[in-house]
């Protein structure tokens, strides 16, 4: 009988213990990623405004890759964690292999199409000729190396499904250090290497990710960590199952990304100060969401394993604890920001107008942070039960509906008042959190009926 190596059985033991043990490394991973992005932008920024603009605009296009990769990783976590919980070890091993096959296949498609459409995408977003030239070269390197991005996300999903978030974090530390070192060497031409500029940043990213992928693969193949992987023939039925679950998750990411672009478009009509204030508040929002993201990422495999083991009450207990903790943490940070919005915004901008506009937005936004926590944790909990449709649908209804309302208002009044935008975003968060709560309880009632 094949073994699962050093995986954690999430169907037994302390639920708070499992959640906290898994959440810490995920939070640290987010911090590491943010830290690398900052260092990378600092390095690129020294090359000039064109280089910085090229990487910034390219980043918005490259996030679409993450949406596809997110779909595969979500489907992988759902099916793999449920198989592990049901003690179907051979099926779990096969699913892991099929997920990697899918990652490779999709990355090749992305590399081919993206390579030829990179320049078009930059032109479509209105970049000037210098930015297009730099951005196209940067994107093509990243796209040709997209196999490292897809397989990295899939391998991390495989480890999370087994209850191991520590190993991906440890590998991320190593790859991030390598990435930062290569950034300095390749961008500026240190230690005898040629000065590659913006393209050097792209090579550093691909090599750093590739290094992490090789370590994670070695640990899986050797059986030292995570799921012991052995070769299985391509199983198109299992691949289709992953795609069916992952496609709605990818669509959810797409709607979320599209809504961000849409909100920026409406805010931009009010000038540079409004855009700057919006950008600062969104950065603060992401910071507050990190604990919610981490808890949501930990809850999903716990729910999946316990659904697979038909331990429904235990799955519900994990969701209850994770949700309460996320709401308390995010609401508390939100309260602090509500009380001192000017101090928080002044960390990013000293401009009085930016601080004034940002304070107003932050005071409308922060009361909805607890509901954002509900959306994050309950959305991933629904994923753990095998439901990716309702999280996608509710994201589309809440955020897409708000954008549609803004379009209607702007049709009659030319532009949407800033106050309406701020209130609309907050109400959208309240609506999505409340509806996610209803969807989760409806789904769990159906799951319980099936197990009776």
Image (cartoon, rainbow, N blue to C red):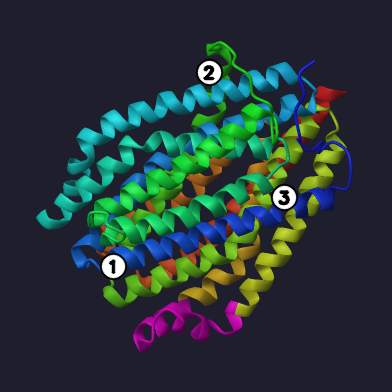
Q: Is residue 314 left or right of residue 295?
A: right
* Front-lying residue, 29 or 272: 29
The residue depicted at 35 percent of the width and 64 percent of the height is 41
In the picture as drawn, the residue positioned furthest to the left comes out as 129
- Label 3 neighbour load within 10 Å: few <14, some 14-19, many 20+: many
Q: Which residues are magenta?
A: 337-360
The residue tagged 2 is 240
The residue depicted at 33 percent of the width and 65 percent of the height is 43
Residue 303 sits in which quadrant?
A: top right
Looking at the image, is 383 positioned above or below residue 44?
above
The residue depicted at 65 percent of the width and 66 percent of the height is 330
Label 2 vs 1, first from the N-terminus: 1
Distance of mark 3 from mark 2, alpha carbons? 29 Å
Label 1 vs 3, first from the N-terminus: 3
- Residue 348 on the magenta span: yes
Residue 430 at x, y percent in the picture: 59, 59
Please identify, in this view, whether the residue under mark 1 or under mark 3 is nearer the observer.
Answer: 1
Q: Which mark is residue 45?
A: 1
- Label 1 neighbour load within 10 Å: few <14, some 14-19, many 20+: some
Query: Considering the numbered disc 2 on the image, is that residue within a helix, a strand or a loop?
Result: helix
Residue 4 at x, y percent in the picture: 75, 27
Query: Considering the numbered disc 1 on the image, is that residue within a helix, a strand or a loop?
Result: helix
From the image, give the main secondary structure of the stretch colored magenta.
helix
Query: Considering the numbered disc 3 on the image, is that residue within a helix, a strand or a loop?
Result: helix
Distance of mark 1 from mark 3, alpha carbons? 35 Å
- Residue 186 on the magenta span: no
The residue tagged 3 is 22
Split into 4 quadrants, where in the image is the N terminus? top right
Please identify, in this view, whether the residue under mark 2 or under mark 1 is nearer the observer.
Answer: 1
Q: Are marks 3 and 2 in contact (CB under 8 Å)?
A: no
């Amino acid at each position: 009988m094949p073994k699962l190596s050093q995986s954690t059985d999430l169907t037994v033991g302390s639920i708070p213990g499992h959640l906290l043990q898994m959440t810490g490394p995920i939070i640290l991973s987010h911090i590491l990623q943010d830290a690398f992005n900052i260092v990378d932008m600092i390095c690129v920024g020294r090359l000039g405004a064109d280089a910085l603009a090229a990487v910034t605009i390219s980043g918005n296009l490259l996030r679409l890759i993450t949406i596809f990769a997110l779909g595969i990783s979500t489907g992988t976590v759902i099916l793999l964690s449920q198989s592990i919980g049901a003690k179907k070890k051979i099926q779990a091993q096969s699913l892991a292999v099929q997920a990697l096959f899918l990652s490779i296949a999709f990355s090749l498609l992305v590399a081919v199409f993206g390579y030829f459409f990179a320049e078009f995408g930059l032109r479509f977003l209105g970049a000037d000729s210098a930015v297009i030239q730099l951005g196209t070269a940067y994107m093509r390197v990243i796209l040709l190396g997209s196999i490292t991005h897809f397989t990295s996300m899939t391998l991390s999903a495989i480890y999370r499904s087994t209850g191991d978030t520590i190993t991906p974090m440890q590998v991320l530390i190593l790859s991030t250090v390598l990435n930062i070192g290569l950034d300095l060497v390749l961008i500026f031409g240190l230690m005898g290497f040629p000065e590659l500029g913006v393209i050097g940043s792209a090579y550093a990213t691909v090599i750093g990710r590739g290094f992490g992928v090789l370590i994670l693969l070695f640990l899986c193949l050797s059986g030292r960590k995570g799921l012991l992987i052995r070769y299985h023939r391509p199983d198109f039925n299992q691949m289709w199952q992953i795609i069916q679950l992952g496609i709605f998750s990818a669509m959810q990411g797409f709607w979320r990304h599209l809504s961000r672009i849409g909100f920026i478009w409406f805010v931009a009509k009010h000038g540079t100060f409004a855009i700057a204030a919006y950008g600062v508040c969104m950065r603060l929002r992401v910071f507050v969401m990190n604990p919610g993201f981490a808890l949501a990422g930990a809850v999903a495999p716990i729910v999946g394993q316990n659904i697979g083991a038909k331990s429904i009450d235990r799955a519900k207990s994990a969701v209850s604890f994770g949700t309460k903790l996320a709401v308390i943490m995010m609401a508390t940070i939100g309260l602090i920001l509500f009380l001192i919005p000017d101090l928080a915004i002044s960390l990013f901008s000293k401009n009085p107008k930016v601080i004034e506009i940002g304070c107003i937005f932050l005071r409308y936004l922060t009361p909805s942070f607890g509901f954002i926590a509900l959306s994050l944790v309950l959305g991933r909990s629904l994923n753990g039960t095998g439901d990716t449709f309702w999280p996608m649908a509710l994201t589309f209804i809440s955020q897409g509906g708000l954008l549609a309302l803004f379009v209607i208002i702007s049709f009659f009044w030319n532009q949407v008042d800033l106050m309406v935008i701020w209130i609309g975003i907050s109400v959208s968060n309240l609506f999505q959190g409340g509806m996610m709560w209803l969807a989760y309880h409806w789904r769990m009632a159906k799951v319980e009926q099936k197990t009776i």
